[in-house]
């Protein structure tokens, strides 16, 4: 028999339960019990607290002064370990538009080293670019924009040990539909981003297999009553996921609520799009090749355009509850299960289910993070952490 975690509430695979006891055995989740099955059992006491699955960030560029594009393994380790303080236990290191050669070096570094990180688990690579269009470029370097290339993807796949999990493109670019079909056949999730596509162009891309809209509302053609655009497609097309950045800067809470109501909270994916200034003081930083100023909680280019975020996923979860646009269980789902489902890794993470790695977080009823566990072991806790650290 393993250890048991006691808490007032558990966000389980099939709904909310508690108070009760969750078994942790050999670093994996066991069964949930209303009463302790053995009086002599070893109990980690989180009375008054809530237990939720570890969060899954499928779109993050950096943290704690490290950027994925630095192509530095020590930086990758730093991001992985820093993620635990955000409640994140699984993530996709996310690249920026750059030259094919630099991207090749970065994906090679990640593919060779992802098993060596000690913090949040790396579940694949997200290539955000370079197949975008200029109209909604955001903080992407237009000099590297090009049409989708199956050959380029194949090179990146070979060099990353077939670790590309997700790639974003603008569906109006030449060759996009053929590229989407090929990528999906290779088990790479295709996302749509930084695009001025019409609703019809987005629809054709989805029919070919594209299934995620990247940071919805941002970097895409807006909703107009005579041309619904990318935003209309993100809201209306069936069986797709819509990412959203809930930092209060990228999207007004009212707009976020409209998306969640239209898309459904089961298909809304909260992401951070966090850059290297996440977890750091305000000041000047870099996002890829661009200088960025972080001020008043937002990261901006010299032009004033938003340049990623400094959002932590635990903050997004708390924000949507505080804004009154999601119940706690919905907020947790949009930051754990939905992201995992969006890239097909929900068979291994993103929920508390028997046999899954015991990656979970401890929250207060006010949605404040208290602790983060990896494989049943407490790896991060705040100063007022209560309960004993368990070894599985």
Image (cartoon, rainbow, N blue to C red):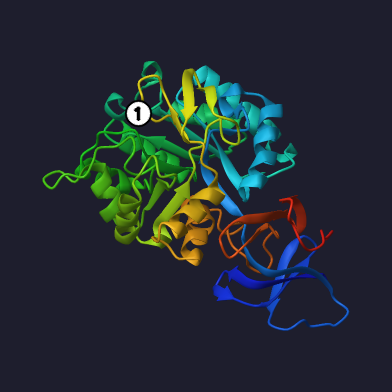
Q: Is residue 244 left or right of residue 390?
A: left
SS type, badge 1: loop
Residue 186 in the image, given as x and y percentages of width and height: 49, 42
Q: Residue at x 55, y 58 (%)?
A: 346
The residue singled out by tag 1 in the image is: 132
Say if residue 174 shows up in the picture.
Answer: no
Residue 324 seen by the camera: yes
What residue lies at 49% left-to-right and 28% top-to-bottom?
A: 294
115 horizontally vs 261: left or right:
right
Residue drawn at 38 percent across, 28 percent down:
131
Q: Is residue 162 above or below residue 156?
A: below
Q: Which residue is nearer to you in this view: 305 or 138?
A: 305
Across and down, in percent, residue 352 comes to 62, 65
- Residue that lies at the very extreme toward the top in this rendered image: 143
Q: Quadrant of residue 39?
A: bottom right
- Image position of 156 with respect to 120: above or below: above
Q: Is residue 259 above or below residue 189?
A: below
Answer with left or right where residue 96 lies relative to residue 212: right
Q: Nearer the viewer, residue 376 or 357?
A: 376
- Which quadrant would residue 197 be assigned to in this image? top left
In the rendered image, the quadrant that contains the N terminus is bottom right
Name the residue located 58 percent from the left edge and 29 percent from the top edge: 68
Horizontal side of residue 79 vs 328, given as left or right:
right
Residue 152: % across, % down: 47, 26
Instruction: Decide: few, some or many residues near mark 1? Use Cα within 10 Å; few <14, some 14-19, many ≥20.
Output: many
Image location (x, y in percent) of residue 218: 34, 38
46 and 145: which one is in front?
Answer: 46
């Amino acid at each position: 028999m393993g250890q048991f975690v006691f808490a007032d509430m558990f966000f389980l695979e099939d709904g909310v339960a508690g108070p009760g006891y969750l078994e942790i055995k050999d670093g994996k989740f066991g069964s949930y019990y209303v009463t302790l099955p053995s009086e002599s059992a070893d109990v980690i006491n989180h009375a008054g607290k809530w237990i939720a699955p570890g969060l899954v960030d499928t779109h993050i560029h950096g943290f704690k002064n490290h950027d994925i594009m630095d192509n530095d393994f020590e930086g990758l380790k730093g991001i992985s370990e820093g993620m635990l303080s955000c409640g994140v236990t699984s993530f996709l290191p996310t690249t920026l538009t750059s030259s094919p050669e630099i991207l090749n070096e970065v994906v090679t570094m990640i593919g060779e080293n992802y098993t060596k990180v000690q913090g949040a688990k790396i579940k694949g690579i997200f290539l955000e670019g370079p197949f975008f269009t200029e109209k909604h470029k955001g903080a992407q370097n237009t000099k590297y924009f090009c049409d989708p290339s199956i050959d380029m993807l194949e090179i990146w796949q070979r060099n990353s040990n077939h670790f590309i999990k997700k790639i974003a493109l603008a569906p109006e670019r030449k060759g996009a539909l053929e590229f989407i079909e090929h990528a999906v056949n290779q088990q790479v999730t295709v996302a749509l981003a930084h695009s001025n596509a019409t609703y019809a162009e987005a629809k054709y891309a989805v029919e070919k297999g594209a299934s995620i809209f990247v940071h919805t509302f941002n970097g895409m053609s807006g909703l107009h009553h005579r041309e619904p655009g990318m935003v209309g497609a993100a809201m209306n097309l069936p069986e797709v996921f819509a990412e959203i950045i809930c930092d209060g800067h990228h999207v007004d809470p009212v707009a976020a609520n409209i998306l969640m109501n239209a898309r459904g909270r089961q298909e809304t994916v909260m992401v951070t799009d966090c850059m290297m200034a996440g977890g750091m003081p305000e000041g000047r930083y870099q996002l890829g090749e661009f200088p960025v100023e972080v001020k008043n909680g937002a990261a901006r280019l010299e032009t004033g355009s938003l340049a990623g975020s400094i959002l932590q996923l635990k903050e997004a979860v708390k924000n949507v509850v505080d804004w009154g646009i999601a119940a706690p269980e919905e907020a947790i789902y949009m930051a754990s299960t939905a992201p995992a489902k969006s890239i097909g890794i929900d068979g291994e993470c993103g929920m508390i289910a028997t046999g899954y790695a015991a990656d979970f977080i401890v929250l207060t009823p006010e949605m404040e993070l208290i602790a983060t566990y990896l494989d049943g072991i407490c790896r991060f806790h705040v100063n007022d952490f209560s309960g004993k650290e368990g070894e599985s």
